[in-house]
Amino acid sequence: MKLVNFFGLVFLLYGCISLEYPSDEIIKEREYLKENRSYILDEWAPAINDYDKYYKSFLNGVENGEYYPIWFNSLGIKNHGVIYLPEKKLHGTVLMVHGYAGNSLGFRYIASKLLQEGYSIATLSLPGHEISDGERGDIEDFREYGELVNDYIKFLRVKGFNVEYAIGHSTGCSSLIIYNELYGWNFKKVVFIAPLIQSVYWLPSKVVRFLSKPFINYYNTKWRDTMALYIFPIHWFDELIEWNDDLRFYKKQDEKILLFQGEQDDVVNWKYNIPKIRSIYPDLEVVKYKEGNHTMFISDVGIGSEIINKIVNYFL
């Protein structure tokens, strides 16, 4: 999903802001889905049918696959994830972390193929996304993303899941980078898709944010569904800036990463981000697509199909 174009804030400085909040029906739907809580350390209850329209598409083409929406405690709130199990488990578990303002549904094509190959899948919702608790779309400190990943993996291990692989998109990549810096990861293979370090128009965005800070703290997004982020809390961008300052002190890591990046990506500043990631992960393999955008992986044809096949071959 695209981040907010901060140039739009220039116009908002001179006009009134009319924030569009989700309807009562949307809020009720989220709360209804939250009621089906199956805590990760408990015996898991099968998902109610109402989950199917959001999560069952992961099992397309997966014979006798199962899925369980689960909850776990981290950051002082209740966080959401979904576990997908193939009929025959031939490999370890793949952790999938979605991007900001997005949701785990974007991984459905990659996940269904991996499930067909015998991998288990564990998706993770960022705080304030999908039906996780927390202030909608915000974070107090980017380091909390790393803490969240660590807590989820610890809970999964208690349940016997060997989390050997990880795939992140955009802020999901940031979360994995922070997790590795704070705790150290033990994945066999890691995939980044359009990773976020700096967003597009980075310097102008910072200037606009500085000028607008006394007046504007929220901004409408264009996404409108049950899982969507209706309003962007600009404090999140402040924390992104802070994290970029922290990155100066990150230590080099030996792990190898496969990174996919579209050259038509108008969400992240990829020409800066890739060298920055390589400064931390020297053993970085980059695959670029001239026609690829920020969500080029959300497909099972064209570029999406190529990415799926490369990930499957990379994990083997």
Image (tube, rainbow, N blue to C red):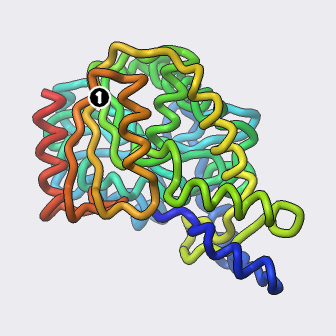
For the point 64% across and 71% down, the residue is 230
SS category of the residue bearing label 1: strand
For the point 67% across and 64% down, the residue is 232
Amino acid type, mark 1: Ile
Residue that numbered label 1 is attached to:
257
In the rendered image, the quadrant that contains the C terminus is top left
Residue 199 x/y as whole percent = 52, 53
Please name whichever residue, 252 or 185, is drawn nearer the observer in this view of the structure: 252
The number of discs equals 1
Is 27 placed above or below 197 here? below
Quadrant for residue 92, please give it. top left
Residue 240 x/y as whole percent = 63, 44
Residue 35 x/y as whole percent = 65, 54
Is 12 placed above or below 205 here? below
Residue farthest to the right, as pictured = 214
For the point 29% across and 28% down, the residue is 257
For the point 60% across and 54% down, the residue is 203
In this image, 237 relative to 294: left or right?
Answer: right
Quadrant for residue 28, please give it. bottom right
* Residue 68 visible here: no
User: How many residues crowd around disc 1 within 10 Å: few (fewer than 14), some, or many (20 or more)?
Assistant: many
* Residue 211 visible here: yes
Please name whichever residue, 124 or 230, is drawn nearer the observer in this view of the structure: 230
